[in-house]
Amino acid sequence: MTLDNSSVQIPHAHPFDYSDLLTYRKEFPLVQQKTYLNSCSIGALSIRSLQGMSQFMMWNDWELWLDQVARARQKFAAIIGAQVHEVALASSVSAALSSLSTAFDYRIRNKIVMSALDFPTLPYQWLAKKRLGVECHFVESLDHMSVPPELFAPVVDKQTALLATSRVCYTSGYVQDVRALADIAHEHGAYLLVDDYQGTGQVPINVRSSGVDFLVTGALKWLMGGPGLAFVYIREELIRDLEPTITGWFGHNGQFQFHARSFAFRPDAAKIEMGTPAMAAVYAANGGLDIVLEAGIEKISERSQYLANDLIARVHDQGWVILSPHEPERRSAIVMLDMDNAQETVQELRAQNIIIDTYFGLLRISPYFYNTIEENALLVHALAEIQDRKKEHHW
């Protein structure tokens, strides 16, 4: 579905561009070598993260490792407004969801409500549980960009165990109203599970005030920590009774007592943890988390929005079709463009050292706080040249 650009609200320039955050630019070798506008796919690694991985390679010591794990939990808790004991680590969002999804009694409530725009990792966990009587219900998007809360409301009922959906849609950058979704779920005795992979790091959240029950996310994208580490938030009141059917020695209350004939869960969210984490990934993630905390998530968000708004205005001036939310308050720093031959265009840009990506035949561009207005201009200029060449070739 294409939209007339006249319906897209072009925001005025933000009075604060937070250009002081560009002092961090020198910490990211990748963005100094390329015009990198692809943070929604893979966040740039900082020198701190690279140094952290080098440190891991030099020191193999359990005490040091566990200290790094504890630090990662603490930093992530601070970013989302959680308490440390409400945070756990996993090897991936898929692993985290695999554990969480085994902790519910589907004989009592067997309905999982999701959005048709969610990344497939989320529904896969429950689609694979049909033999347990689980029923998956998908709320469709009317504009292929957003799923407003009022579309979820009629679907959630007393049979619903979870309303599980993304806070930021990976195909449009649409930011869901999480508080409204929590109210809908809780009204019927259901829980809200948020896949925040595209949100954490670029759009502020406070899990307490937003009413989230469970949140999963990863270090790969906006947290700039590379692959191999995911984070889980479990609301304090739910931890005690949550008992997944898959586990490991990190989830045991007596982890280093090595009782092979008995099992007792830890009393905190880490009860869902399984085996030894990929420690190089933990070291790398701590570098990215440090930068998010130092720079400030509010400032990072404002800077990223400033860059996204500038990009949208430049694209609008070209007359190209923008498939991002109309309302500025519902946009993230993910900008989608509808252009012919998107995959070919991405490859042509890559040959010019300009990195974006493509999904479903659309261009997906994601400036982050370490990017610049000049990089937006360079991208738009390169896209215009590619479009002109295609027209000439066509004629």
Image (cartoon, grey):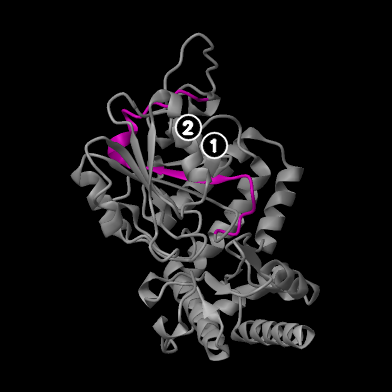
Q: How many marks?
A: 2
Task: Tell me where residue 231 appears, x and y as whole percent.
Answer: 49, 46
Query: Quick one: 338 or 278, which is closer to the camera?
Result: 338
Task: Tell me where residue 31 appears, x and y as whole percent.
Answer: 69, 72
Q: Do labels 2 and 1 touch, CB within 8 Å?
A: yes
- Cα separation between marks 2 and 1: 6 Å
Query: Quick one: 143 or 168, which is closer to the camera?
Result: 143
4 is higher (above) or lower (below) than 62: below
Q: Which residues are magenta?
A: 223-247
Q: Quadrant of residue 383?
A: bottom right
Q: Which residue is mark 2?
A: 99
Residue positioned 68% across, 74% down in the render: 26
Task: Tell me where residue 352 appears, x and y as whole percent.
Answer: 78, 77
Decide whether residue 230 is among the magenta residues: yes
Left or right for 353, reference 133:
right
Left or right for 250, reference 228:
left
Q: Which residue is mark 1?
A: 95
Residue kind at label 2, given as amino acid type: Ser
Residue positioned 38% across, 63% down in the render: 142
